[in-house]
Image (cartoon, helix red, strand yellow):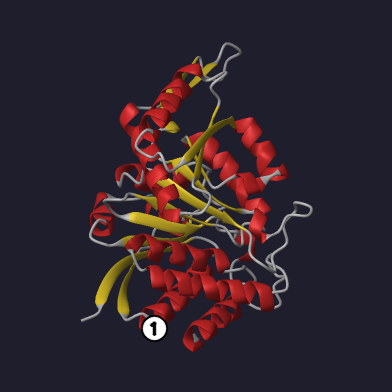
Amino acid sequence: MSKEYNIAVVPGDGTGPEVVAEGIKVLDSVAKKCNFSIKYKNFSIGGEHYKATGETLTDEVKASLRETDAIFLGAIGHPDVKPGILEKGVLLNLRFDFDQYINLRPVKLYDGVDTPLKGKKPEDIDFVVVRENTEGLYVGAGGTLKYGTPDEVAVQESINTRKGVERCILYAFEYCRKRNMGKKLTLCGKTNVLTYAFDLWERAFYDVSKDYPDIQTDYAHVDAICMWMVKNPEWFDVIVTDNMFGDIITDLGAMIQGGMGIAAGGNINPNGVSMFEPIGGSAPKYTGKQVINPIAAIMAGQLMLETLGEQTASDIIEKAVQKVLKEDIKDVGAGKMGYTTSEVGDLVVDFIDKE
């Protein structure tokens, strides 16, 4: 009997439902080919739901999400909802409450996709960022004093625990070993200024490294990482870093791999329910126009299957995407593809069906 996966689908806001539809189309095609099945359950979470109910993420919804194998997210973000409400109430809430302590971001340039880096080719841009996802500045520790006055004070604290730091680093070493490419893990930090937090990170990094003699290790400040990602991205294999620095360098990574239309990521709890999403956001001005590139959502599905252990299916999706990017799509930008959102999904499915 074939295996069945229960997947929670959160289409979300803006163009989220459009790209999620293509992701599901591709998942269904590859599931049929690889002899497993997927059962979907849709959840109305996001800006429209918040406007109608005042709710972001209820305990009842979270209980239902816990019964699934993974969460497939389109996008969260609505122009009529004040910034921070949905991000904290939905995205951070899920990451923290489901202990999705790893944010995994592949940065890979495919044939047929332009990079703004002069002279760089696909073989030069192929690395992964492992970002700690539940600590640091994002925990919301801090406050204000004398708000709105000339004497106002604002404090935001970065919380780093040995447990949180070490488990992220351990995941990065294991991932680097499994990836089996450059077998090099780089710690990204700022030890010369953030002396307390990154003293902890650095000590944990080299303590864990003793159990991985096959992995080459090095360290670079976050500002140097940004420089080298632009000048010599081929130096990197796997990068591990904290929540804030990871947020910054993965957006830079998305740009050098060709843009937000390509970039996908996973919020991972290795022992629980993980969530997978395109990086590009809800893009509300394009809603309903069928011009958004769905490749990032399709690759989010690919990353989900990889994490669930369906490596063959994951590889087939990536191969299909490589073909479509190289031979079919003219440009990965919104409205520049030469195809509609749905037609791009059809191209990927057509390759999978013939594979």
Residue 312, relative to residue 164: is it above or below?
below
Which residue is rendered at x = 47% and y = 58% of the image? 277
The answer to whether residue 117 shows anywhere in this view is yes
Extreme residue toward the top, this view: 151
Q: Amino acid at mark 1?
A: Lys
- Viewer-side residue, 273 vs 175: 175
Q: Which residue is mark 1?
A: 33
Extreme residue toward the bottom, this view: 354
Residue 307, relative to residue 205: is it above or below?
below
- The image shows residue 33 at horizontal and vertical percentages of 39, 83
- Is 351 left or right of 307, judged from the image as shown? right
- The image shows residue 41 at horizontal and vertical percentages of 31, 69
- The image shows residue 28 at horizontal and vertical percentages of 40, 79
Extreme residue toward the left, this view: 1
- Viewer-side residue, 267 vs 112: 112
- Viewer-side residue, 101 vs 121: 121
